[in-house]
Image (spheres, helix red, strand yellow):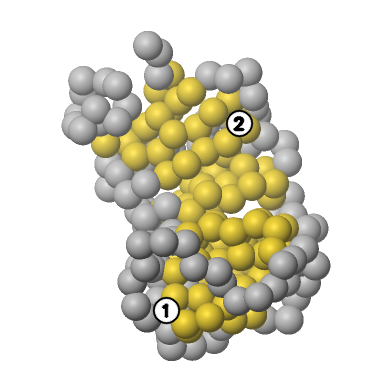
Amino acid sequence: TDDSSVPRRVGTDTDWSTLDAGGSHACAIKSGGSLYCWGSNGSGELGIGSTTEQLSPTRVGTDADWAGVSAAVNHTCGLRAGGALYCWGNNSSGQIGDGTSTQRTTPTPAGTGTDWQSIFAGYLQTCGISTAGWLYCWGENEFGALGIGSTTDQRSPARVGTDTDWAAADTNRYHTCGVKTGGALHCWGLTGDGAIADNTAWKENPVLVAF
């Protein structure tokens, strides 16, 4: 548990394929598709069925078809190879996407679809893109960070506009940004810190960022 100012090797395995680090925890997928998480676990963000912290990589369930993972401050989301999306951990603002605000300590389906291609977990929000290029966001929406034209929290995936050409997104507590397949960059949410390159208080819908 000692801090380290230099890289330390995590275990001895050499078959890790992808990873993401959250607030005080990290998760990684092995080449065979198994998912492991470790670190802080006060909200169940490790997905292992408890809130006990883990000092070394601990396997999440027994499934071996995980294709992607995104770790936020105290919740985590994972994408399965077949396109199903799961989230777990803190759910105070509905960021798990299961229609409730109940904390989850094991992977829980987000929404009902199985056509997800990417996932982006933020502070108290989550956004995902479907194979059709649709962008969805859910969770805390105090300053319009979900991009749905309102400031109402969403406990299930809510579609952002009607565009079908979203390629990537990233979300933080108060704002979100997304990139279209043609390369256009859009941001929305709180603008007071200049994060959206706009002088108004906040934007509840995607705003094109131009320089």
| Residue located 72% across and 36% down the image | 132
Q: x, y (%) of residue 100?
A: 46, 69
Residue drawn 69% across and 64% down? 16
Looking at the rendered structure, the secondary structure element under dot 1 is loop
Residue drawn at x 21%, y 23% is 200
Q: How crowded is mark 1: few (under 14 residues within 10 Å), some or many (20 or more)?
A: many
The image's mark for residue 117 is none
Q: Locate the C terminus and report the quarter of the image it occupies.
A: top left
User: Which of 187/92 is in front?
Assistant: 187
Near mark 2 (Cα within 10 A), the count class, few <14, some 14-19 or many ≥20, is many
Residue 197: image quadrant is top left
Residue extending farthest to the front is 6
Say if 47 sits above or below 133 in the image.
below
Three-letter amino acid code at the position of disc 1: Asn
Residue 63 at what x, y percent from top left? 75, 75
**Mark 1 vs mark 2: which is more N-terminal?**
1
Residue matched to label 2: 166
Mark 1 vs mark 2, CA separation in Å: 32 Å
Is residue 80 visible from the viewing direction of this image? no
Report x, y in % for residue 168.
58, 36
Which quadrant of the view contains residue 1?
A: bottom left
Picture layout, residue 136 above or below residue 124 = above
Q: Which residue corresponds to the image point at 73% horizontal and 81% vertical from the top-left?
A: 62
Kind of residue indicated by mark 2: Trp
Q: Tell whether label 2 touches label 1 (CB within 8 Å).
A: no
Q: Is the residue 45 above or below the residue 85 in the image?
A: below
Task: Name the residue that disc number 1 marks.
Answer: 41
In the image, is 18 to the left or to the right of 53? right
Residue 170 lies, in percent from the top left, at 47, 42
